Amino acid sequence: MADALPNAPTQEEIDGAKIIARQDRIPIWALSYLFIGILGIGYVFIFFDIFNINVSFIQTAITLGWATSPTSATITSLEGFVVLLNLIGYVIGALVLSPFSDRFGRREMLIVTLLITGIGSLFNAVVTNYAEFAIARFITGIGVGADLAIVNSYINEVAPKNGRARYTSFLFVLAGIGTVLAVWVGLILTTPATAFPKGLPFALANAGTFLATNGWRLMYGIGGFLALIGVLPRFGLPESTRWLITHGRPKEADRIVTEMETRALESMEELPPLPESIPIVQKPQPVPYREILTNKLYRNRTILLFLVWFFGYMTVYINAAGLSSILGGAGFGFPENGMVVALGIFGFVVAGIMASFLGDKMERKRWLPISAVITFIGGVVIAFGVNNLGLASLGALLIFIGMDFFVPITYTWVSESFPTRARATGFAMADGLGHLGGGIGLIIVGALLSILKSGSVESIFILFAVISLFQIISAIIAQFGPKTANKRLDEVSP
């Protein structure tokens, strides 16, 4: 009998490929919807934490003596450095912790990352100076960076091929709830009562009260509490079937896929025909970075997707972390600037809903120019709304729709663009390093604010045109990326 070919698949690899083929033929979500809720709770906290600083930082800066006026342009510059340090932590967490997920499993690391994020938020609640505040944001960033990489890898590995954007975006709807909570709770706890529409008449940070100087501390304390709530249910998540197959554990994967088939048949008469089995690499590199850096396909994808994120996150984080401060520096009164953000933030939820319905209808990269145009239009509307709360709020709503429609679509796209054996690592390299653009962008805008005429329509138009330009550049670069919609993961990224 002739010797087997050196690269011939083993029987275990053949069996593993068949298990994944069985999963790939399931056209609907076939795990408990409770698992989406469990991941969603974590998203509520993470995005509560990311957007917490948008409104509350003004009170933080004044309370701790970093600025004397709530509309000072200095606040944006101070915030820019803090956001940059938070994003450096994001990069480090993504690059250091995400590869452990590729080596040791998704579920265990999802528990670790949310714990780190919660610890950072609790530290934020008790800081006494700028250095401590920045360090706390750095720690939080470590957890957030890794968590988002692993969550997006996990959800795309268990979702049906025709619904990966849908379920990633559904999580983003829950993230939107976290952002709305962050901005509205921040407005209530860190701004004084002001007649509507300039502010909230029931806001609690009135002179002489505890919340007049400590509302922001309570905000971060709430964030830490949400993290504790989010960690415990994660112990009940099943491991990713694709990860199990890649690491030579087909029996466990077979059990999970069998349960998925049973659940799917409760909603449909029969399953579609079994597709062709695609070979699965079961011996990944001990250091997942080798899978990316030594493979020309994935190395080139990483560079392109990094640039997409780098410029895209400039726009996203300028608005996500600093819109309230930017509006204050541009001529909007306090707390009216926070009110504009609070009304506009509902665009985040709208964007998640839009992406869940539309994301799988067209190639991911085709949606990015559309989202950039919406963001640009929002900036134009804000420029003409400097003395009109309704118009300014509409502009903020469009900005949040445009930039936040971009995010879940790109989350899906990036996680699809790397193989299971290094998916979280590849996501971390592109998305994690790309986050540096967010901090750099906020610093650029802080410098731009200092030279533009405050309150001028022309100046605000220039400001938001520059902010939107970053996302437009991102969308142009994206057009050179891979097509992934409605394809099997192992077909897109073998």
Image: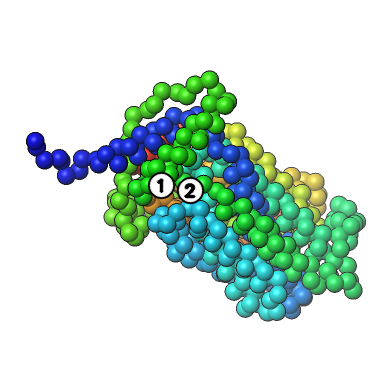
| Residue at which label 1 appears | 244
Residue that appears at 41% across and 54% down: 102
Say if 358 sits above or below 345 in the image.
above
Which residue is painted at 68% across and 76% down in the image? 127
User: Which image quarter is the N terminus in?
Assistant: top left
Asked if marks 1 and 2 touch (Cβ < 8 Å), the reply is yes
Residues at marks 1 and 2, CA–CA distance in whole angstroms: 7 Å
Mark 1: which amino acid?
A: Leu
- Name the image quarter holding residue 128: bottom right
Residue 296: % across, % down: 29, 50
Q: Which structural element holds mark 2?
A: loop
- Residue 68 rendering spot, x and y as whole percentages: 77, 75
At horizontal 86% and vertical 56% (from top left) the residue drawn is: 200
First of labels 1, 2 by sequence position: 2
Q: Residues within 10 Å of mark 1 (few under 14, many from 20)?
A: many
State the residue position of label 2.
239
Image point (49%, 21%), residue name: 270
